[in-house]
Image: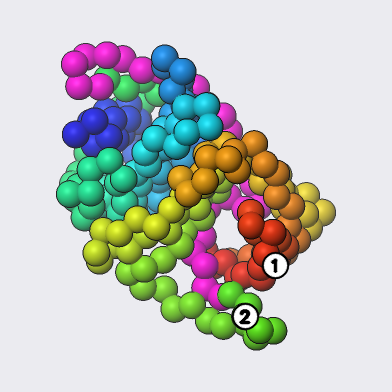
Amino acid sequence: MRTLCLLLSFLCAFATIGKAQDNFQGAWKSSHGGVNSVLLITPGYFSITTYQDTSFIDTMGGTWKADGGDDVAVKIEFNTEERNQIGWEGSVPLSYADGKLTTTQSGGQQVEWTRVDNGDAPLAGSWQITGREQNGKMNTITPGARKTIKILTGTRFQWVAINTATGEFFGTGGGTYTFADGVYTEKIDFFSRDNSRVGASLTFKGKVDGNSWDHSGLSSKGEPIHEIWTK
């Protein structure tokens, strides 16, 4: 229940949704005992990830939306620590003060979160892969239960591959990014499939046209990729 308690206490640190939902969007971080926690909040989607040095520990996330009054409706789409929580839905009361987030975990321990960015950037939002080039042809990927999502704030990113129907988790990675003059660069802070990739930087060509992002370059394995992502 640790990750769910973390989520609920985190959400309970928000202010009234009608007044502050723009204020808490972006990236937040917390460190305790050498363990790093990162929270990414974009319009309609969130993730919470913990890692230590080069080792990935766990991640969870899903959708959220204003539920009227002072509540937010949450649905868990992935949780690597407690898979039985996938699909959990509920409404959570909100409170937020002085531009700070403070959570109370089970046992009463309080954790203070420090803002990393305010989520303001051309690529900020949640994206889903909808096209991938193979043998010179761009093939459409129809959104469904099995999906790959990329969550970006102003400076941080995370991708996650999941199946919401079966609860399967296929992998995740994340870290910091920059995007300028058509060049998108990632620096990896955690990677569930291969810890040796932590610290690596990957550079891609990128073009955003409305809700479509054309993304091409070499993958972490050095293989050419050309993808279309859609908000």
Would residue 115 be counted in the magenta stretch? yes
Residue at 48 percent of width and 49 percent of height: 193
Residue at 43 percent of width and 23 percent of height: 35
Sequence-wise first label, 2 or 1: 2
Judge whether 49 appears above or below 76 on screen. Answer: above
Judge whether 22 appears above or below 97 on screen. Answer: below
Q: Which quarter of the image is occupied by the N terminus?
A: top left
Measured Cα–Cα span from mark 2 to mark 1: 10 Å
- Taking the image as drawn, is residue 151 in sight? yes
Query: Relative to the observer, which residue lies in front, 199 or 120?
Result: 199
Give the left or right position of residue 123, taking residue 142 as reference. right
Kind of residue indicated by mark 2 = Gln
Q: Are marks 2 and 1 in contact (CB under 8 Å)?
A: no
Residue indicated by mark 1: 224
Element marked by disc 1: strand
Give the left or right position of residue 115, taking residue 216 as reference. left
Residue at 27 percent of width and 20 percent of height: 104
Residue indicated by mark 2: 134
Part of the protein shown in magenta = 105-131
Residue at 25 percent of width and 66 percent of height: 165
Kind of residue indicated by mark 1 = Pro
Residue 57 at x, y = what percent? 39, 35
Residue 220 at x, y = what percent? 63, 54
Element marked by disc 2: strand
- Taking the image as drawn, is residue 64 in sight? no
**Mark 1 Cα within 10 Å, few/some/many (few <14, many 20+)?**
few
Query: Relative to the observer, which residue lies in front, 41 or 203?
Result: 203
